[in-house]
Image (cartoon, coloured by chain):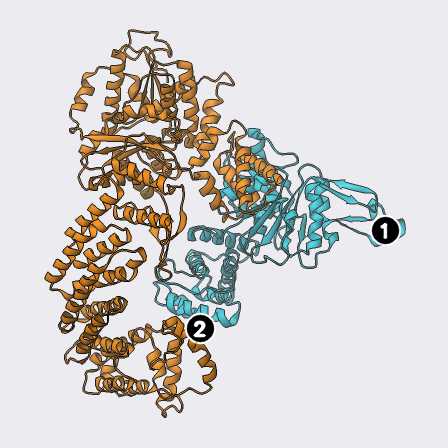
């Protein structure tokens, strides 16, 4: 605006303090504001440009004009002591601040940021708060407030602060503030449009909209005024100030310096900070950060800013292109009708120009047969629009980020907008390195890739789903304390995590991660640590929790060609320790404890199987037998151990029958017998279906439970059986109908059921043998 | 103006159901006056401005104090798109599951725009081409040969020559070859009469509102050439219980007036119950979102809820004590839910036993339903 006291342009009232200052009150990320700022700057020819932004980043402004700088990008300012305290100031191609920066750099005019230094805010914050910056916090408060009171008034109130121009547009019946701007602000002067005049009008409107301020606003505006005073003192003639429209009324009267100085004196001491440029995405522009003003349709704004004319028609043409690429039929006639519908809708709503709402509704009605399924495509690809910015390589970054950039380049594996999937063959050098990079970044907390759940199948392949988030820039800075390259940082962090792990399982997880990420330097000290801790840890539960990760590592580690001999030693001793400690740990447990122990038993059993070491397996089986035999053992665990042994072919069917008979005798309390049964039967009903003797035992036992205890046992039994698949349950039910009557002829254990065709079955055996890796000649000892 | 006033003011109260333009003549007059006062532009041959049409459908209060009842309770966006479509001389296709007020909206749009909602072609599997174009008076044809006098125009042809809105109900039930006659009418805006070597060209203001069923998809799906001539609006099921209750109670009230049912007060609680049952069964989830339910084969649309409540009121008035009680709606609600007896009956019984039973204030309802089902 042109300050009310003095006319715009070259200083007229030179004596007035505000004389040389022209305030351009903008809408953050508003393409209309951006156009107006460009026009106003061209008109004004300023000799200094002040922009609402973090002063720490002043030195980075010239980079905005760098040829390989491509928005969307953001300024990142973080506290050196704690990089998680950081703030982002994103800029899109259509951001007025971006336009002003580039104008200033291009015209060789001093450009500086005049917002309150972020250092004050970072010092201000309590330690535990995850701080984008203070405005982020207040913005989300506003969100909650909006949710609580859905009334329009409250929504408008909060909008007045974060986006006052949108509030004006809403009041005028527009739901697309940018179209309102075009309609009301730009078309106002009937062709003789002057950007400076329009800013004056905005300033007038703001004086009416702005009714309440908060202490934070006052501090920031005091700092802005101080900056403006400095520039006036320096003798600038035409100072352009680009700031959020909300602040314009506060900067109109510069006034005396003393009160502002007092306000600023009360601020907490500035924290030391560092600033840099980072790439940003369109999707992230829709979040409130930095300026506290998020936009929901960056793609549409980009279009508004770049389309030279025929905004609606060009947009629809892009929609058509998008649909055609997806093999959806769209003709030119569709576009004609959609354009007409959008314009008529706008007229019906009393708006001169069709906004995003009208265009979207027209697309849905004309192109999508009224349904909204395809509209999601338009929303993602166009309205938000996937776009990832670029920053020049010589932007100052922490060494770690530079190393990552080098890796990106070396592997031709850089961030891309949106989510993508890659499949990596670990036997090849390049994909192998990519996998290592992703694993290392995961260790550093930069979850660029998420490993798909395909570990069971071919272990030479990894499927990653990649999604680069601009916030990773901060995580990189945070991780920089660990080292200067991705590999060393990941090693150092792993070592630290292992040393600080509270339980053994934590260490083995680190070991697994280290092997996947190929960090041999980290592995040795961690292995020593692991061996020491395993020796000292007396809790068998901890040991058991640690084993599965180790076993997986050993089993699959050699795919990557890592040396795992030291690891095997640790694993073997671990199994021995577990086997010794397990039986005592299985007695005297309550139900919860027994359930947890059962899971451990199953997992350990699986892990021991993976280790594929005869000695270890023998140790483990001995432990299981002790659990199965010992009197006074928790029923569930004893039963489970028996089942595992039976499955491993260590006890025969007769033995199982005998034990079942013993466990289900009337002398044993039914509740305990039911728990034992749960242990035996859980994890598959085949046992019961194929062994009628067992089923008969079970049947007799159930029939013999006294009426008063039956109700106590029932929930336990129900739980056991509810774990079976539906068809299995049905089958058992069918068998149970006959089992009580007479021994089932022909279905006795080992005998062939009626209708069994041995010749046909034999033909499948070679394939089964091959699948089991038994070779072709060997007979299975069934 | 209330619906009551509109109904008594109409000239012929003996017909079972009045056309929209008669039932709401008072409101339409008031809107016309409001248009004239404010000088809003009207598209050619439109009786009202687009703004007034939107107000007529969505309800509101005019400057002279006339209260316009809401004809359509639902998203404003949908009505605006529909009106904007007709204002651009495009044809409008209203799609939705049965009972989502497609016909209702099309009738009122035609009444408000052209002042005539009777230019109607009912689509059936047997709709002949004559119903879309024109037929012949064969006595005339044989006596005097082909001439304009011997020609019997279809409602569509009448609408074209008078610049009015024609309505086609259940477009997708019409055989594909008959549907295709629409293509020329909608794109060239003309109807050739080869027998006379003439044509009827559409006057300004002509357009078509067609309705089609979501569930009928595939019966006679529109060809893409025809579909392209329509802007499509999908009418959703009511978004909230309150919205649906408003729709049902308003329609029940006006239906009761038209059918001269005795006044039955305080039906609100029962309406809420019917709507709750319908919404829960339709979504397969109880209102509190805690219990999953099986869904029946019927659509359970607001229209069916309206008829359940209206039937209940008739029962209460003639056989009951003049108050709508759970017993009065029980039979109707079961009839609406249980369509395909084998599975729907199970669905209903499960609902009754797991949800209705034990819900606060539903004891009478539960008992009545049990009695009826038994």
Q: Which mark is residue A61?
A: none
Identified at 69% across, 47% down, the residue is: B182
Viewer-nearest residue: A375 or B105: A375
Disc 1 crowd rating (10 Å Cα; few below 14, some 14-19, many 20+) is some
Mark positioned earlier in the residue sequence (2 or 1): 1
Instruction: State yes or no: discs 2 and 1 in contact (Cβ < 8 Å).
Output: no
In this view, the residue farthest toward the right is: B143
Q: Quadrant of residue A23?
A: top left
Picture coordinates of residue B234 (x, y %)? 54, 49
In this view, the residue farthest toward the front is: A777
The residue pinned by badge 1 equals B140
Q: Quadrant of residue A336?
A: top right
Could you say whether the residue bearing mark 2 is in a helix, strand or loop? helix
Q: Say which colour chain B has.
A: cyan
Position of the N terminus of chain A, as image quadrant, is top left
Could you say whether the residue bearing mark 1 is in a helix, strand or loop? helix
Q: Say which colour chain A has.
A: orange
Picture coordinates of residue A110 (x, y %)? 31, 17
The residue pinned by badge 2 equals B371
Please determine if labels 2 and 1 lie on a single subunit.
Answer: yes
């Amino acid at each position: 605006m042109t300050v009310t006291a003095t006319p715009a342009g070259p200083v007229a009232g030179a004596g007035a303090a505000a004389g040389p200052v022209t305030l351009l009150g903008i809408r953050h990320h508003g393409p209309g504001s951006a156009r107006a700022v460009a026009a106003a700057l061209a008109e004004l020819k300023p000799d200094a440009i002040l922009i609402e932004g973090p002063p720490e980043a002043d030195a980075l402004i010239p980079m905005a004009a760098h040829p390989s700088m491509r928005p969307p990008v953001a300024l990142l300012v973080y506290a050196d002591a704690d990089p998680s305290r950081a703030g982002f100031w994103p800029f899109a191609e259509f951001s007025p601040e971006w336009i002003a920066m580039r104008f200033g750099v291009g015209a060789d005019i001093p450009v500086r940021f005049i917002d309150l230094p972020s250092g004050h805010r970072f010092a201000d914050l309590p330690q535990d708060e995850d701080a984008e910056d203070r405005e982020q916090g207040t913005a989300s408060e506003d969100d909650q407030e909006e949710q609580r009171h859905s009334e329009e008034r409250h929504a408008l109130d909060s909008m007045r602060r974060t986006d006052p121009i949108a509030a004006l547009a809403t009041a005028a019946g527009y739901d697309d503030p940018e179209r309102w701007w075009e309609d009301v602000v730009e078309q106002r002067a009937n062709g003789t449009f002057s950007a400076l005049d329009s800013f004056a009008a905005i300033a007038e409107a703001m004086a009416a909209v702005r009714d309440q301020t908060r202490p934070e606003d006052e501090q920031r505006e005091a700092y802005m005024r101080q900056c403006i005073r400095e520039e006036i003192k320096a003798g600038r003639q035409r100072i352009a100030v680009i700031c959020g429209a909300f602040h314009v009324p506060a900067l109109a009267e510069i006034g005396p310096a003393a009160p502002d100085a007092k306000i600023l004196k009360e601020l907490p001491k500035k924290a030391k900070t560092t600033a840099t440029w980072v790439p940003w995405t369109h999707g992230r522009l829709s979040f409130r950060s930095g300026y506290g003003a998020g936009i929901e349709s960056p793609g549409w704004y980009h279009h508004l800013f770049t389309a030279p004319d025929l905004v609606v028609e060009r947009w629809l043409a892009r929609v058509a292109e998008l649909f055609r690429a997806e093999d959806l039929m769209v003709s030119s006639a569709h576009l004609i009708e959609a354009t007409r519908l959008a314009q008529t809708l706008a007229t019906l709503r009393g708006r001169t120009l069709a906004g995003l709402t009208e265009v979207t509704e027209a697309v849905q009605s004309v192109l999508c047969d009224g349904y909204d399924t395809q509209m999601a495509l338009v929303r993602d690809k166009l309205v938000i629009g996937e776009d990832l910015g670029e920053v020049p390589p010589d932007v100052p970054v922490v060494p770690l980020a530079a190393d990552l950039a080098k890796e990106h380049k070396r592997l031709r594996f850089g961030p891309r907008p949106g989510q993508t999937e890659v499949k990596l063959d670990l036997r090849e050098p390049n994909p192998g390195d990519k996998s290592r990079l992703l694993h290392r970044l995961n260790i550093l907390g930069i979850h660029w890739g998420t490993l798909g759940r395909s570990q069971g199948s071919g272990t030479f392949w990894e499927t990653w789903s990649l999604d680069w988030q601009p916030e990773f820039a901060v995580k990189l800075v945070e991780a920089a304390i660990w080292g200067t390259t991705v590999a060393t940082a990941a090693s150092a962090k792993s070592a630290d995590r292992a040393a600080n792990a509270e339980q053994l399982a934590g260490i083995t997880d680190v070991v697994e991660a280290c092997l996947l990420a190929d960090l041999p330097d980290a592995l040795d000290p961690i292995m020593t640590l692991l061996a020491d801790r395993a020796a000292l840890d007396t809790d068998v539960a901890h040991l058991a929790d640690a084993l599965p990760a180790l076993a997986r590592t050993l089993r699959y580690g050699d795919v990557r060609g890592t040396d795992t001999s030291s690891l095997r030693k640790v694993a073997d001793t671990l199994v021995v320790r577990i086997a010794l400690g397990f039986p005592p740990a299985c007695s005297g447990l309550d139900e919860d404890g027994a359930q947890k122990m059962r899971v451990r038993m199953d997992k350990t059993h699986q892990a021991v199987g993976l280790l594929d070491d005869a000695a270890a397996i023998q140790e483990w089986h001995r432990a299981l037998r002790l659990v199965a035999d010992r009197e006074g053992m928790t029923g569930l665990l004893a039963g489970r151990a028996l089942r595992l042994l039976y499955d491993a072919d260590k006890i025969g069917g007769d033995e199982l029958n005998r034990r079942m008979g013993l466990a289900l005798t009337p002398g044993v309390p039914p509740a305990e017998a039911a728990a034992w049964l749960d242990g035996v039967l859980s994890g598959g009903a085949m046992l019961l279906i194929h062994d009628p003797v067992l089923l008969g035992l079970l049947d007799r036992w159930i029939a013999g439970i006294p009426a008063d205890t039956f109700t106590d046992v029932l929930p336990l039994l129900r739980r056991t059986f509810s774990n079976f698949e539906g068809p299995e349950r049905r089958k058992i039910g069918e068998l149970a109908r006959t089992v009580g009557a007479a021994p089932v002829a022909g279905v006795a254990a080992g005998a062939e059921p009626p209708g069994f065709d041995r010749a046909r079955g034999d033909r499948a055996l070679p394939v089964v043998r091959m699948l089991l890796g038994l070779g072709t000649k060997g007979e299975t000892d069934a | 103006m209330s619906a009551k006033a509109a109904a008594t003011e109409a000239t012929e109260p003996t017909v079972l159901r009045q056309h929209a333009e008669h039932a709401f003549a008072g409101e339409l007059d008031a809107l016309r006056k409001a248009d004239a006062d404010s000088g809003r532009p009207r598209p050619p041959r439109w009786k009202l401005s687009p703004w007034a049409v939107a107000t007529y459908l969505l309800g509101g209060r005019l400057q002279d104090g006339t209260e316009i009842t809401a004809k359509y309770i639902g998203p404003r966006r949908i009505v605006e798109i529909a009106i904007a479509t007709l204002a651009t001389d495009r044809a409008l296709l209203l799609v939705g599951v049965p009972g989502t007020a497609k016909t209702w909206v099309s009738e009122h749009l035609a009444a408000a725009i052209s002042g005539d909602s009777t230019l109607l072609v009912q689509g059936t599997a047997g709709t002949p081409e004559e119903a879309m174009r024109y037929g012949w008076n064969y006595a005339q044809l044989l006596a005097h040969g082909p001439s304009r006098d011997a020609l019997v125009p279809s409602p569509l042809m009448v609408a074209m020559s008078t610049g009015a809105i024609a309505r086609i109900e259940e477009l997708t039930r019409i055989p594909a070859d008959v549907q295709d006659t629409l293509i020329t009418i909608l794109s060239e805006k003309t109807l050739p009469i080869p027998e006379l070597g003439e044509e009827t060209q559409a006057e300004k203001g002509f357009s078509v509102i067609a309705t089609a069923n979501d569930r009928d998809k595939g019966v006679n799906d529109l060809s893409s050439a025809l579909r392209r001539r329509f802007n499509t609006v999908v009418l959703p099921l009511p978004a909230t219980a309150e919205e649906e209750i408003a729709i049902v109670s308003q329609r029940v009230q006006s239906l009761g007036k038209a059918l001269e049912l005795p006044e039955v007060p305080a039906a609100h609680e029962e309406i809420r119950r019917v709507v709750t049952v319908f919404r829960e069964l339709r979504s397969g989830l109880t209102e509190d979102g805690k219990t999953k339910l099986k869904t029946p084969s019927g659509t359970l649309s607001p229209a069916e809820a309206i008829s359940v409540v209206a039937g209940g009121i008739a029962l209460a008035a003639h056989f009951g004590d003049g108050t709508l009680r759970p017993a009065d709606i029980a039979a109707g609600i079961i009839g609406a839910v249980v369509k395909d007896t084998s599975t729907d009956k199970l669905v209903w019984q499960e609902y009754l036993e797991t949800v209705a039973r034990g819900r606060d204030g539903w004891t009478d309802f539960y008992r009545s339903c049990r009695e009826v089902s038994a």
